[in-house]
């Protein structure tokens, strides 16, 4: 059982991990080992103290070298669900599960708004996870929306199972080499069906499908963590970055604007300290 699970390898997650490591705590850190794509994307960052006019890529390299120096490991996994087990939290990644006494959500904000019908049909033909649900669509027709090139391996996996894949990539130069994949440019506007997802609409065009995969870098936190309170589309937190769920904290862009590195780093640090305080105060209950 881990003391803390950090979800997200952006600036907030990096800061929380450095703080927990410095305090010598036993934690697990989920997300991409290459860190958040957003970090590298900034052309020039002019408002980060101590680093004048650094590029996003330089910032990413600096974070990575500090993580290595501190001997911190990243579990290169995407979390698909967080469940309150009473005494601890169960964290599901594809088919693996982990246990932690506290959770720090540092999952950033979604780069695309939810598609109409997405939440209505989630678990009924709509999935966020290729490795969890791909096998259900062996020999079937699916639509896939993908927000990041880093997730292309999931598309390839789906293409190896499905009969036909309608792919809508929201990034430049998709490089999927499979004959059963047809690129449908633009955006999925709506997922429709009766009891389950049966078709996707792209403007005027409608395609019949057996399932829809939405491969995104970030999943809405309230979908990830059942019962999590939200406010104006962000995780509702207080100044200690506590959420409405005991032992669950949130930091960075997912708690609201401004979307900035300095705020994310500060909040990652506060959330880690709040988790530590919670662990020492609740040594006999969830902690
Ligand atoms: C082009 C661009 C330029 C920018 N320029 C600046 C600037 O000059 N100055 C500035 O202050 N800010 C800038 N920003 C904003 C800055 O990048 C963000 O505020 C910062 O990255 C937020 O950090 P975060 O950790 O909250 O979220 P993110 O950096 O978004 O990281 C969240 C991470 O969590 C991961 N994640 C999400 N869900 C899961 C899950 N279920 N399981 C595992 N991992 C998950 C995501 O994949 C992602 O890696 C810029 C942003 C962009 C896009």
Image (cartoon, rainbow, N blue to C red):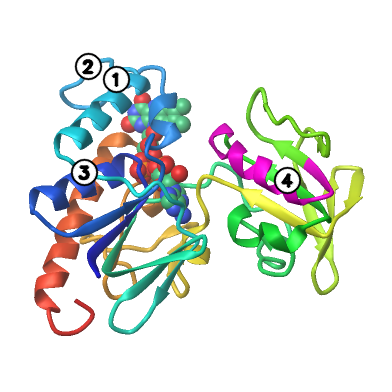
Give the SS element for disc 4.
Answer: helix
Q: What is the C-alpha distance between the residues marked 2 and 4?
A: 47 Å
Residue 32 position within the rendered picture, expressed as x and y whole percent measured from the top left: 41, 42
Horizontal arrangement in the rendering, residue 271 relative to residue 43 (left or right): left
- The residue where tag 3 is placed is 72
Name the N-terminal-most of marks 1 and 4. 1
- The residue where tag 2 is placed is 52
Which of the two residues, 137 or 281, is positioned nearer the viewer here?
137
Give the SS element for disc 2.
Answer: loop
- The residue where tag 1 is placed is 46
Q: Is mark 1 within 8 Å of ligand 1?
A: yes
| The label number, if any, that marks residue 160 in the structure image | 4
State yes or no: residue 158 in magenta. yes
- Please tell me whether mark 2 or mark 3 is closer to you in this view: 3
Q: In which image quadrant can residue 101 be found?
A: bottom left
| Other residues around mark 3 within 10 Å, as few (<14) / some (14–19) / many (≥20) | some
* Residue depicted at 19% across the width and 56% down the height: 272
Q: Quadrant of the N terminus?
A: bottom left
Name the N-terminal-most of marks 2 and 3. 2
* Residue depicted at 60% across the width and 44% down the height: 112
Residue 6 position within the rendered picture, expressed as x and y whole percent measured from the top left: 30, 55
Residue 239 is at least partly visible in this image: yes
| Other residues around mark 4 within 10 Å, as few (<14) / some (14–19) / many (≥20) | some
Q: What is the C-alpha distance between the residues marked 2 and 3?
A: 26 Å
| Other residues around mark 2 within 10 Å, as few (<14) / some (14–19) / many (≥20) | few
The magenta stretch is: 149-166
Q: What is the C-alpha distance between the residues marked 1 and 4?
A: 44 Å
């Amino acid at each position: 059982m881990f003391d803390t699970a950090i979800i997200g390898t952006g600036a907030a997650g990096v800061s929380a991990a450095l703080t927990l490591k410095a305090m010598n705590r036993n934690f697990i850190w989920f997300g991409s080992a290459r860190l958040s794509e957003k970090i590298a994307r900034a052309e020039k960052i002019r408002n980060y103290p101590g680093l004048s006019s650094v590029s996003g890529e330089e910032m990413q390299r600096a974070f990575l070298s500090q993580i290595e120096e501190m001997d911190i490991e990243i579990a290169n996994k995407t979390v698909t669900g967080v469940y309150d087990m009473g005494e601890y939290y169960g964290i599901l990644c594809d088919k693996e599960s982990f246990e932690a006494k506290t959770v720090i959500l540092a999952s950033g904000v979604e780069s695309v708004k939810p598609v109409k019908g997405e939440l209505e049909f989630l678990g009924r033909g709509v999935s966020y996870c290729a490795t969890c649900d791909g096998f259900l669509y062996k020999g079937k027709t699916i639509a896939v929306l993908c927000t990041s090139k880093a997730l292309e391996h999931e598309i390839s996996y789906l293409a190896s199972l499905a009969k036909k894949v309608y792919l809508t990539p929201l990034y430049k130069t998709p490089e999927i080499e499979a004959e059963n994949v047809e690129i449908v440019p633009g955006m999925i506007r709506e997922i429709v069906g009766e009891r389950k997802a049966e078709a996707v609409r792209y403007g005027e065009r409608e395609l019949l499908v057996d399932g829809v995969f939405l491969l995104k870098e970030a999943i809405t936190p309230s979908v990830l963590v059942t019962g999590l309170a939200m406010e104006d589309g962000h995780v509702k937190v207080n100044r200690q970055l506590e959420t409405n769920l005991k032992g669950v904290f949130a930091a960075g862009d997912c708690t609201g604007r401004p979307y900035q590195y300095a705020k994310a780093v500060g909040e990652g640090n506060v959330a880690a300290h709040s988790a530590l305080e919670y662990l020492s105060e609740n040594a006999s209950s969830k902690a």
